[in-house]
Amino acid sequence: LAKTTQPISMDSYEGQEVNITCSHNNIATNDYITWYQQFPSQGPRFIIQGYKTKVTNEVASLFIPADRKSSTLSLPRVSLSDTAVYYCLVGEGITGGGNKLTFGTGTQLKVEL
Amino acid sequence: DGGITQSPKYLFRKEGQNVTLSCEQNLNHDAMYWYRQDPGQGLRLIYYSQIVNDFQKGDIAEGYSVSREKKESFPLTVTSAQKNPTAFYLCATSGTGAYEQYFGPGTRLTVT
């Protein structure tokens, strides 16, 4: 399993763009990079997933350089409700179904007025 | 949540008792997972099941047991052999070939 490293915490203000970078030097060829968001006392929620280059959806963008050894989650114009823990995960390749994910300690994002 | 039900939300037990946590899903997903989360920590995988009547140990399976008799259900039993069972337990599912996992609302277990 590829180990991931991300900052323990980040602070921001409402309306700013937040970029959270994750390192995964040992990523395997068939691994995807996935980001989850978790609020206190709730289960994590899927945000975005990518394999290479750039992926964008309605809530975030994910930038992955060519060597895939890192990735950056970009949250545009954050609000107070974006205060949460963000997890970067690198998933094993699918073999016969199922997907083992390894969650690190995540990045605690705090957004203030 | 939204298709994954975990009950109860809070559970209290005395030390030495086995306790079973429920996880039910109506997403028609093949794979189901159990995670444990301790305060300020990430999630750790306890057990997972890719298909009915089959399951594999995760990273911290000792002191836990599971069954997968139906596609919709994946109950987790915390046995008295689990040395520190107090934690937040999360159930998740994923579809075949999908990397995205959907999580239930969790059960907070307190053992005294």
Image (cartoon, coloured by chain):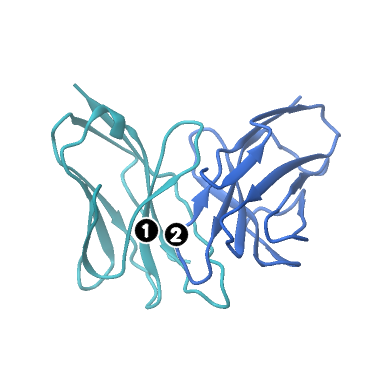
Chain colours: A cyan, B blue
**Callout 1 secondary element:** strand
Q: Residue at x 52, y 64 (%)?
A: B95
Q: Using residue A40 as the reference point, say whether residue B77 is left or right of it.
A: right
**Kind of residue sitting beneath label 2:** Glu
From the viewer's side, name the closer residue of B109 and B84.
B109
Q: Quadrant of residue B89?
A: top right
User: Of the residues tagged 1 and 2, which is closer to the observer?
Assistant: 2
Q: Report the residue that reaches farthest toward the left.
A: A16
Q: Nearer the viewer, residue B80 or B26?
A: B26
- Residue shown at the point (18%, 21%) measured from the top left: A113
Question: Quick check: do tags 1 and 2 share a chain?
Answer: no
* Nearer to the camera, B19 or B79: B19
Provide residue B50's location: percent of width, then percent of height. Answer: 63, 67
Residue density around tag 2, few if under 14, some if 14–19, many if 20 or more, within 10 Å: many
Q: Position of residue A106 (x, y in %)?
A: 39, 44
Residue B34 coordinates in the image, percent (x, y): 63, 51
Numbered circle sitting on residue B100: 2
